[in-house]
């Protein structure tokens, strides 16, 4: 019987064909932790008495959440991780201000198609866009992987999302995943693997595929995955032939199968306070905006900044609106400078800050006050997520966020261009 | 492994912020976390958890962030087992890893607040002594069984690496 790509990867790492629902032990290729979950992982690792990590070249530490360190506690957390890296001989440390983990790691090409990544962060699923198995765990789980190089996993049920039709001009990967959340809700892919396929996905670039996989966890998924194709191969600089095994078999079975026709779909917006609370931008009416945030592990990549700049070029943001762009990594920042995107932002009155998670989790750099309305390109709009519990967060694509900054109310890019 | 106690019941989608609000995450001190457990529940607070070792919940218990504090706080408050219709997956892992039993039981609504309930992990059953009903639950397998037997992941790794 055929297997899905997720089943193939897990079978290979378990050393036997896996079945949905069974618990198997698998080898892990890459691990990731950051300045919030990392310090606990270090303490637990030390309690395990394991000494050295199983493979220091397979550990990444990314100091991206409360950085550049926003307070003394943050500085101490970062120091603890730097010290751990020095003791262990871990060289893959992305220091304060270098970027957001789920942008940096795929960008570095360190992760490889067909591999397994475990990260102490729920949005680790982002990397599934590289045709690999990536999922989030807690700190102690990660510490145990550092000690053993293996972990246990319950084999997820398989869900396929097949996208067909013509992508409208301003539609992006963000709109597609918001639409999926609208269809199936925040529990719709509970414990499952979400595989994205179809002619629309084949034409999506890697940046948009990352956005798709990033928010699979918002539907409760264990992982999101895009099978390998020419786009994947080009991203890794290999021939498509080399990756030809990293697709699902034609006769693989799926517990759930959804067909989505994207033709004529308007941009999608998640309204407060759940990522599953999604509407067409055109149904929203007149919603005045106080803050706009463009960045995060969902939409902090070059393609996202380009889409925002395209809307903002030659325009000014509305009076009274605070708009902030945080590029997802140093690389994205440099490229945005070279291409003149940063100029476009600054001329439009948008603030450009250092690569960081920033306000996405309400940490710092543009946190929302009581009653403020935020349009954010990030992934969660739970009550209190971006600051005060009474702030109202709308999740949208970079193009919609940029258009909303220009008009001062939630808007479709078509209103501006 | 057997746990028997009076049960306290909560509803569906109890998230990690409800189990332990974000403002307390600066601490990993069990006694402190125990003081604030379930404080973020909207609506009714279950109140006195002393002498309660089993918590019953609906669907998707422990959804939200990957914070381990949620499992730690419940454990510190004396809860040894959560019986839920379903668990959010990271919480399920965190529970097993920190020595809190997580038991999936579709018929959890047959257990009511105050019932005298017994969970038997080896025999794979839940007994409601108040009503006489018996339910079967899947037994833990493989690595999960070994982690539970060791009392948590830290102990499991210590044993496995011989430290
Ligand atoms: S950008 Fe937001 S969602 Fe992404 S890793 Fe940072 S805090 Fe988490």
Image: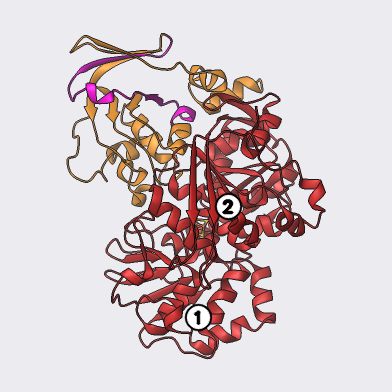
Tell me, yes or no, whether dots 2 and 1 are on the same chain. yes
Which one is earlier in the sequence, the residue at label 2 or at label 1? 2
- Asked which secondary structure carries label 1, the reply is strand
Of the two numbered discs 2 and 1 in the rendering, the one whose residue sits closer to the viewer: 2
Q: Could you tell whether A27 is left or right of A165 in the image?
A: right
Query: From what the image shows, is residue B135 above or below residue A18?
Result: above
Q: Could you tell whether A351 is left or right of A188 in the image?
A: right
Chain A visual colour: red
Asked which quadrant contains residue A319, the reply is bottom left
Residue A100 visible (yes or no) = no
> Is there CB contact under 8 Å for labels 2 and 1?
no
For ligand 1, tell me if the residue under mark 1 lies within 8 Å.
no
Residue on which the image places disc 2: A126
Mark 1 falls within which chain?
A
Q: Tell me the residue at 45%/53% (across/down).
A: A180
Residue on which the image places disc 1: A351
Q: Tell me the residue at 74%/56% (across/down).
A: A230
Query: From what the image shows, is residue B20 above or below residue B10?
Result: below
Residue B144 at what x, y percent from top left? 52, 23
Residue B75 at what x, y percent from top left? 36, 29
Q: Which residues are magenta?
A: B95-122
Q: Is residue B67 magenta?
A: no
Give me the chain that's orange: B
């Amino acid at each position: 019987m055929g297997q899905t790509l997720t089943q193939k990867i897990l079978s290979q790492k378990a050393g036997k064909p896996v079945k949905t629902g069974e618990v198997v032990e698998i080898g892990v290729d890459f691990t990731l932790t950051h300045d919030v979950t990392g310090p606990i992982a270090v303490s637990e690792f030390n309690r395990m008495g394991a000494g050295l990590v199983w493979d220091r070249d397979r550990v990444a530490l990314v100091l991206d959440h409360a950085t550049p360190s926003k307070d003394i506690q943050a500085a101490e957390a970062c120091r603890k991780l730097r010290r751990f890296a020095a003791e262990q001989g871990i060289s893959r440390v992305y220091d304060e201000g270098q970027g957001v983990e789920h942008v940096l790691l795929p960008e570095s090409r360190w992760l490889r198609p067909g591999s397994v990544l475990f990260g102490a962060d729920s949005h680790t699923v982002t990397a599934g866009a590289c045709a690999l198995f990536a999922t989030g765990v807690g700190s102690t789980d990660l510490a145990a992987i550092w000690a053993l190089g293996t972990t246990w996993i319950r084999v997820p049920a398989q869900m396929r999302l097949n996208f067909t039709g013509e992508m409208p001009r301003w539609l992006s990967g963000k709109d597609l995943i918001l639409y999926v959340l609208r269809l199936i809700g925040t529990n719709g892919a509970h414990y499952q693997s979400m595989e994205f396929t179809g002619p629309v996905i084949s034409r999506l670039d890697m940046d948009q595929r990352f956005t798709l996989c990033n928010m699979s966890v918002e539907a409760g998924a264990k992982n999101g995955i895009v099978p390998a194709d020419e786009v994947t191969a080009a991203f890794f600089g290999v021939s498509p032939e080399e990756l030809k095994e990293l697709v699902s078999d034609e006769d693989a079975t799926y517990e759930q199968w959804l067909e989505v026709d994207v033709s004529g779909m308007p941009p999608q917006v998640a309204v407060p306070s759940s990522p599953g609370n999604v509407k067409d931008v055109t149904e929203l009416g007149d919603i005045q905006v106080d803050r706009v945030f463009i960045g995060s592990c969902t939409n902090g990549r070059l393609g996202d900044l380009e889409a925002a700049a395209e809307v903002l070029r030659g325009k000014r943001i509305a009076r009274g609106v605070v708009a902030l762009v945080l590029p997802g990594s140093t690389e994205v920042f440099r490229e945005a400078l070279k291409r003149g995107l940063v100029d476009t932002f600054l001329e439009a009155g948008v603030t450009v800050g250092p690569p960081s998670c920033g306000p996405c989790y309400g940490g710092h750099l543009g946190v929302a006050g009581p009653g403020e309305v935020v349009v954010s390109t990030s992934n969660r709009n739970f009550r209190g997520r971006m600051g005060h519990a009474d702030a109202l967060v709308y999740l949208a694509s970079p193009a919609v966020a940029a258009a909303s900054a220009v008009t001062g109310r939630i808007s479709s890019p078509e209103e501006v261009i | 492994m057997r746990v028997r106690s009076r049960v306290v019941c909560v509803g569906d989608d109890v998230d990690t912020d409800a189990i332990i609000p974000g403002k307390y995450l600066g601490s990993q001190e069990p006694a402190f976390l125990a003081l604030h457990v379930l404080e973020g529940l909207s609506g009714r607070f279950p109140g006195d958890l002393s002498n309660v070792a089993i918590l019953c919940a609906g669907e998707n218990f422990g959804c939200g962030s990957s914070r381990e504090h949620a499992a730690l706080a419940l454990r510190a408050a004396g809860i040894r087992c959560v019986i839920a219709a379903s668990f959010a997956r990271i919480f399920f892992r965190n529970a097993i890893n920190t020595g809190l039993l997580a038991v999936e039981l579709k018929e959890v609504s047959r257990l009511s607040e105050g019932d005298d309930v017994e969970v038997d992990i080896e025999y794979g059953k839940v007994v409601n002594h108040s009503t006489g009903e018996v339910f079967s639950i899947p037994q833990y397998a493989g690595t999960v069984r070994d982690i539970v037997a060791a009392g948590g992941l830290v102990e499991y790794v210590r044993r496995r690496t011989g430290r």
